[in-house]
Amino acid sequence: MSETRIQDRGEAETLRDVPHHKLAAAADKAIRGGVARPVAHDSAARHVTGAAVYVDDIPELPGTLHLHVATSSRAHARVAAIDLAPVRAAPGVVAVLSAGDIPGENDCSPVFHDDPVFAEGEVQYAGQSLFAVAAVTREAARAAAALARIEYEDLPALLTVDDALAADADLLPPHEMRLGDPEAAIAAAPRRLAGTIRVGGQDHFYLEGQIAYAVPGEGEDVLVHSSTQHPSEVQHTVAKVLGVADHAVTVEVRRMGGGFGGKESQPALFAAIAALAAKKTGRPAKLRVDRDDDMVMTGKRHDFRIDWEVGFDGSGRIAGAVFRQAARCGYSADLSGGIADRAMFHADNAYDLRAARIHSRRLKTHTVSNTAFRGFGGPQGMIATERVLDAVAFALGRDPLDVRRANFYPPGGGAVTPYHQEVTDSVVSEMVEELERSSGYRARRQAVRAFNAGSPILKKGISLTPVKFGISFTATHLNQAGALVHVYKDGSVHLNHGGTEMGQGLFVKVAQVVAEVFQIDLDRVKITATTTAKVPNTSATAASSGSDLNGMAAKAAAEAIRGRLVAFAAAKYRLPEDRIVFLPNRVRIGNEEMSFPDLVQEAYLNQVSLSSTGFYATPGIHYDRETASGKPFFYYAYGAAVSEVAIDTLTGENRVLRVDILHDVGRSLNPAIDLGQIEGGFIQGLGWLTTEELWWDEAGRLRTHAPSTYKIPTANDRPDDMRIAIWSKGENRAETVFRSKAVGEPPLMLALSAFSAIVDAVAAAADYRAFPDLDAPATPERVLAAVEDARRRAGFA
Amino acid sequence: MPDGQSLDITITVNGEARTVVVDTRTTLLDALRDRLHLSGTKKGCGLGQCGACTVLLDGRRIVSCLTFAVMAEGKAVTTIEGLAQDGSLHPLQAAFVEHDAFQCGYCTPGQIMSAAGLLSEGRNGTDDEIRDLMSGNICRCGAYTNILAAIRDVLPRESGR
């Protein structure tokens, strides 16, 4: 028996030196699965066999109840009367929960206390939660809920951005960023343009819908399995609703079937209801939201209206620009403040505007409260910028690429953003030059023109657009993360951190970091479910920050343990610490080598702690709201894409024929994972800009609440020819984890190239004589209308 | 809601005869997940439009959320759990791992079963045709390039095309 197995009751002082294992001959090889390796997703084998456990796959405990949430059918109304007696009397019903049943606060909002779990007195959107039914089956709960007798007295409803603008309905105070004197710069500029662009929202359509499974514990305790990007916030919300301390609530999530921002603040409602039911009934309670209900009840990407003005010279160099952004927030604040801020932070995209005013209004409507979605306002800010560049180029009759290039942030620094952060790391010129060459942009642009000259019905367009995306939570305090690492006596490692896995490959990346620090094979590192019981007070896995923050925290934890091992070995073998070197799966101590597990065992026997937390906070970032200035971003991620599209001028149908992408991920932690993020981000952005149209009727009811009416890109909508490259020169000048860069959100905005290319194709349909007025998404209807409008303005008969 | 009629039905699931008592309105998806505890088959939309619940019924692919369990009586159902044989992955499963043909993994069982259906239905064609045949399976993470590459690896290349 190994001494290390003696945990107590051993004879005193009987320890001998640990017999060292013979080192394998292959020990010289690099570890399997360190950083920068294209390691497969940690759940790969489970994903393909159906063995990966999502919340709905956790075996149900005996007595589990199923919940259904009944919602408002009106956009804005006073609830005059609500009779739940028939619901309570329905077969299979165990409990009916409404506002009066909440022992704590009736609120599941992230910040502003304005999202009731169950509406009381007044409803503010069609789909707002009114009450929940707990029954022995899902079907019984749903059927019972339909028996409620509810009387509404309708109130006036604001449904659109324009409704809210007309009513001056600001949900949150406006914010403004100002650089120089843009009005004077525009007035003095040789050329001026102005316009408006509207951009629609987007439903997340995570394939796994919202779900929570609550298991009551003793006393006030409850365990909630929640499909969430933000376990700490779910924990806090559940505690707030139950009226208990945060420590009574544990929230756990192993993986999500997609998140995309839709599981940042949105899961709190469902987790709170499940926990409430579990504590009221003493039985486990599951709330798996039906897809149509999910789409109606949960927030989406904000739709925006953006009015712009720009002044420029004959070469297209911008002298000054003004953007007035109006965001439809819905009925409550949710994360709208931060999202509208990020839209402002990206109104410059990759361009030095020299003088700028970015004005933002956050508008209240009686629609679902819009929320985080990959890009978090950034894409909406950037679409208007790209529209400006296209319009300027059209007005001057120049290639839009030349106009874009004339305005890029210079590589050497010196230029500042509208929020006064100096851009010191701009690699956009260099990347665009490389992509222009590798994609054959110039020749293809000529070919497109030649094609269009001979094609009366089908028209092609091409565009190259850049992406510069600021990395960090703009609420500075959120830029922190924790991790917990244990090394067991056999040298195997248990890894936990505050980040959540939604398919983006965060878990495997962080495990690679830990494997690298210890120089052990990746399969020696166990990745474990995110739980509020192991790492507390975490930020959402959002803002593309997952690897940056949690990777650094896990690295700190692993390095703490490695440091103790080094100190122990140095003391024991009377060597300076620099003679203790971690080599692949072994440690060199002076002139001897021993395996990692052997060193761990020795350390254990000598009472060395083999567990550590790790913590990381991004240094040096700040933003002052009063002066609208600061350094909110640690660094920027860059990318560029060329899209070539074709439109059918008779039907408005459009298709991306080819896309070339060059994207900067710094020094990639895992190129395979990063490529997947780049491709997937582009496709998701393409869906937002072309096919995914949310449509509310005049009564404020969402009528696109299933994939039958809401068109998500399929295998067929993927561009026929996709050429994606990670920028080989990429490195992060900021001190990030192994100099990698965040990759979750930035690639989504590469799809703006497709939207600009469609604009180019519409212009072709009017023989380049009128600049298209095309809003997003560029559905066939909109493309057709834009073609007809452009042709009319161009004087076509 | 009136009670539906309950029936005793026997379905051969992954080669094994299984008898379950179901309400006549129970979907095959719910029977598989809730009664037979085969949770590999996923519920995505419940409307037959996302493909996450795809299984094979007598070798043909179907969306199990739009199929009543009673319609599978006496037939053979293959789910993702039944694809691996003797502990080794089906070639499609191995190809999906090889090509990183997923991100969140939630659509993956449906994608693989749909591709298995192409094999067992003897369907094939150009890349375009394969994409068309797979367009009933949504991958919201957008891993389509790798999904196609994985399927292409396994489907026999048709001669003469």
Image (tube, rainbow, N blue to C red):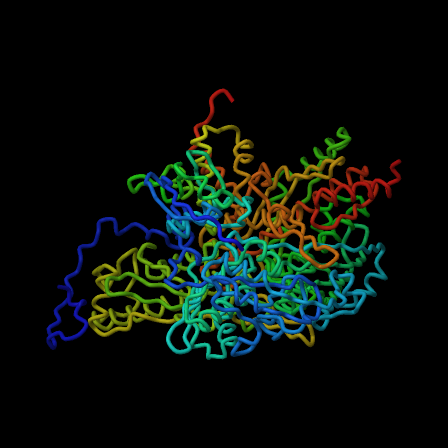
Above-or-below relation of A781 to A125: above
A52 or A558: nearer the viewer: A52
Q: Is residue A670 left or right of residue A751?
A: left
Which quarter of the rendering shows the C terminus of chain A? top right
Name, please, the residue furthest toward the top.
B160
| Quadrant occupied by the N terminus of chain A | bottom left
Above or below residue B101? Residue A302 is below
- In the image, residue A149 sits, relative to residue A653, either above or below, namely below
Where does residue A372 sit, x and y in percent of width and height? 60, 62
Total marks placed: 0
Residue A707 in the image: state x and y as whole percent.
60, 47
Say whether residue A225 is visible.
yes
Residue in front for this viewpoint, A117 or A506: A117
Q: Quadrant of residue A296?
A: bottom right
Seen from the viewer's position, the closer of residues A394 and A652 is: A652
- In-front residue for pair A238/A185: A238
* Residue A403 horizontal side relative to residue A601, left or right: right
Residue at x-position 83% and y-position 44%:
A789
Residue A571 located left or right of residue A632 = left
Q: Residue at x 35, y 44 (%)?
A: B19
Instruction: Answer whether residue A671 is visible to the viewer in this image.
Output: no
Image spot of residue A430 (x, y percent): 61, 50
Image spot of residue B75 (x, y percent):
40, 36
Residue A56 quadrant: bottom left
